[in-house]
Amino acid sequence: MTRITVTVAAALWILAWVRVGVQVATEPAPSHAVHYVGLHAEPNDGRMPHCHGPILAEGDALWRSCEYRLDFGEPPGGGLVRFDLAARTARMDWRLGDDPSGAELEAAALVSDGLLVLTRRGHRLLHLGFEGGVQARGTVDLPLVALHPDAVVVDRAIEVSRAEPEVRPFDGPALALPVLNCEPTEVCAARGAWRDDGGWIVWYTRMRPDARQVEILRARPGGVPVVVQRLPYAAEDGRVLAPLDMAPAGRLVRFPSDGPMARLEGDTWRPALPPPDEHGLPASPDLDVGADQTYALLPGGGLRWHAPLYAPFFPRDFTQRFRLLDDRWRVLRLEDDRLTIDGRPLDADPRWLSSDSALAPASGGGQWLMGPFGTHVHLDDGLRRTDVPGLAARVWAVVGRFDRLRVYNDLYLDFAPLKIAGYLLVLFGFPLALLVGLVRRRRALLVACGAYVVLACANAWWFWLLTRHV
């Protein structure tokens, strides 16, 4: 009787590990999760923050606009979450509004002890400390040209045929910059400004509604705006050129709002359009995705902003496009339930990465791919995953899911302690039963193995469900 019981127990134990082995060999590896910390990261928050839109990258710390609840019964509010992917933690101390759109930003600048941000709603200027806390710095009541750590640049002009930029330091008098006057039939605007050793440099655009090109002008301190380039644009779609993507070696990020976009490459502005798709159709600026269709970056290790580019709300073939720092376009797609980048399968579970994902540079090289809940993987420069977890980590990840997924799936909510105990018992109970038999008498081995058989069979269905994505 003892031999039969031990044989049955061993067979169940081997089948359990075969199940795990098959899943590890055939299922994509799980992505890494973060542990939420900070003022609003209590376990009863109700659910994980759902993040969307751009990413501000400061080394391996990625700031992202998110919606999250303070308590389960409350509606979600808007805030920023700082994901430190190297440490796999996320701070949630920067709640900026009572609705998700309260965290949408117009611009951001990196300062010594945090971020300086301008909100899209209310045009509030806020200081966000790295270790938490929000301090109000007033409002910006004129169109923003640029945001710097110590000043804002605004356009004081009322008429669309005039651009009148002005620097407003946080400590000191205002400084007028060169004015651009246009003909009554032209539309002019100051698009960006930064400083070098010679003072402030301002960029402008000038266009006529009936023209098919936009002029890019530049002015240095004490000078007059001079045309440096002309860019074509499609007049029939009724859009003007969006704010220019200017990235000097400073600490500035500009958040363009809509329309086609131009980027400064060397001394030349180029339209920032993705390449033709797989059907040979040209990329179009008509894809209506609001602020998510554009991105900016800073050279020299400064603050960066990355977001899905030209990804419509109902994309064909679930295609999302991303642009990386090397200026190469990449395509992220879900194919046969596998996540692919440029058609190459990525060894990562797509469920927590494919929607609202974004790529950002890692400080040690390569890229972070982060999904809307902070789940992430690290990729090398060839976009191959470098942090695939081993067998032990994948087995233990099942236990970790009970904290993350309890709000989303009743499997991880109801009877969680029993399910965790049953899962661990199925995998490790048989060796313990053998140990009992070695230490105690033969009858103890029969009882221990018999108990293992009963408990393993009782937990078989839960075990099968919990190991679907080891």
Image (cartoon, grey):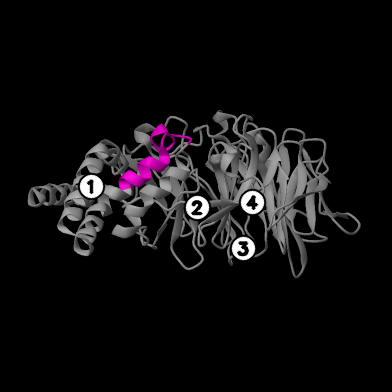
* Alpha carbons under labels 2 and 4: distance apart: 13 Å
Spatial separation of the CA atoms under disc 1 and disc 2: 34 Å
Percent from the top left, x then y, of residue 1? Answer: 8, 47
Q: Does the magenta-highlighted stretch encompass residue 2? A: no
User: Label 4, label 1: how many angstroms apart (C-alpha)?
Assistant: 42 Å
Q: Position of residue 44 (x, y in %)?
A: 58, 39
Q: Nearer the viewer, mark 3 or mark 2?
A: 2
Give me the disc on residue 302.
Answer: 3
* Three-letter residue code for mark 4: Gly
Residue in the foreground of this view, choosing between 417 and 347 = 417
Q: Is residue 9 above or below residue 141?
A: below
Does residue 273 appear in this view?
Answer: yes
Q: For the residue carrying disc 1, how many other residues have a C-alpha within 10 Å: few (<14), some (14-19), or many (20+)?
A: many
Q: Is residue 168 left or right of residue 305?
A: right
Residue depicted at x 23% and y 55%: 433
Circle 4 residue: 38
Q: Main secondary structure of the magenta part?
A: helix
Name the residue carrying label 1: 452
Percent across and percent down for residue 184 are: 77, 34
Q: Amino acid at mark 1?
A: Tyr
Label 3 – label 2 distance at C-alpha: 24 Å
Q: How many marks?
A: 4
Q: Residue at x 90, y 59 (%)?
A: 172
Q: Which residue is mark 2?
A: 34
Mark sitting earlier along the chain (4/1): 4
Extent of the magenta region = 407-423
Q: Residue 72 in the image: x percent, y percent?
A: 59, 33
Label 1 vs 2, first from the N-terminus:
2
